Image (cartoon, grey):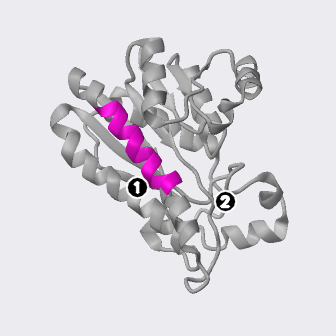
């Protein structure tokens, strides 16, 4: 895995930073995208704080892939670390525009990332696409139909692309977290409140929240040659909740 080029999207969100740190520690070349990098100062600050990582400032999926490929010649693994607002609303109050936004962030963007990177992977007959999604579609979550629908669509994209791309030796998998500490969904101000923590862990068999570093270790496995015979797998990472 030491010679692999891994592209991580939305690195400042969800589990992006721990994944980047884990892969870098293993000697992997890591290229990072984030929406905030359109700002030159933000991109420079990130690079200064993370000298082992390479930043691409492009935002459109095809341009992100092109920039990373120009810098390193190829992309071996794409980690689509996509995140979007989990808006709580009963169906009669849910707004179609919010659903469209969720689909754009958590379905269309990773779809376009896969579409952009697949041609070079097909040409080499080798590659890996890993979507970071959610366990919520595996069980359902009342009043979160928009979020769950978007995440479920990307889980479906995973199994469909795995069937399509397997003949080209491209593995497509998804890690589906829930109840994992992250600045996006379970930030410290929630986790550190005893009453909130008790409510969150009530339905988790392991009675704790997952650590982002644990997700990162699983990403490293899927990004390595140890997972070459695994594809079309949506892996729940939710402490037994799903």
**Which numbered mark, 1 or 2, is in the foreground of this view?**
1
Q: Main secondary structure of the magenta part?
A: helix
x and y percent of residue 184 in the render?
Answer: 68, 52
167 or 91: which is nearer to us? 91
Place residue 129 in its image quadrant: top left
User: Looking at the image, which residue is at 66% across and 59% down?
Assistant: 208
x and y percent of residue 72 in the render?
Answer: 45, 13
User: Is 45 placed above or below 170 here?
Assistant: above
x and y percent of residue 15 in the render?
Answer: 61, 43
User: Is 148 placed above or below 174 here?
Assistant: below
User: Looking at the image, which residue is at 22% across and 23% down?
Assistant: 123
Q: Give the range drawn in magenta.
A: 104-118
Q: How far apart are marks 1 and 2 (CA)?
A: 26 Å
Queried whether the magenta region covers residue 108, the answer comes back as: yes
Identify the mark at residue 208; answer none if there is no mark.
2
**How many discs mark residues in the rendered view?**
2
Q: Which of marks 1 and 2 is nearer the N terminus?
A: 1
Query: Which residue does the numbered mark 1 point to in the structure image?
Result: 154
Give the structural element (helix, strand or loop) at label 1. helix
x and y percent of residue 60 in the render?
Answer: 50, 36
Crowding near pointer 2: few (<14 within 10 Å), some, many (20+)? Answer: some
56 or 88: which is nearer to us? 56
User: Looking at the image, which residue is at 82% across and 71% down?
Assistant: 195
């Amino acid at each position: 895995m030491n010679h692999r080029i891994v592209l991580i999207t939305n690195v400042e969100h969800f589990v992006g930073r721990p994944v980047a740190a884990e892969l870098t520690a293993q000697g992997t070349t890591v290229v990072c995208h984030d929406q905030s990098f359109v700002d030159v100062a933000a991109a420079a600050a990130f690079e200064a704080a993370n000298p082992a990582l390479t930043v691409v400032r492009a935002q459109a999926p095809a341009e992100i892939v092109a920039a990373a490929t120009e810098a390193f010649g190829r992309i071996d693994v794409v980690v689509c670390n996509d995140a979007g607002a989990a808006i709580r609303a009963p169906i009669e109050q849910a707004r179609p525009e919010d659903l469209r936004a969720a689909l754009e962030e958590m379905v269309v963007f990773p779809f376009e990332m896969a579409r952009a990177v697949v041609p070079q992977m097909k040409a080499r007959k080798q590659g890996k696409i890993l979507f970071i999604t959610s366990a919520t579609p595996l069980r359902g979550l009342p009043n979160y139909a928009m979020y769950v629908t978007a995440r479920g669509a990307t889980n479906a994209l995973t199994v469909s692309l795995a069937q399509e791309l397997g003949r080209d030796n491209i593995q497509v998998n998804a890690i589906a977290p829930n109840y994992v500490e992250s600045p996006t969904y379970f930030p410290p101000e929630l986790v550190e409140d005893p009453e909130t923590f008790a409510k969150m862990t009530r339905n988790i068999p392991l009675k704790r929240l997952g650590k982002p570093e644990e997700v990162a270790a699983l990403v490293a496995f899927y990004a390595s040659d140890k997972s070459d015979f695994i594809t079309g797998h949506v892996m729940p990472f939710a402490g037994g909740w799903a």
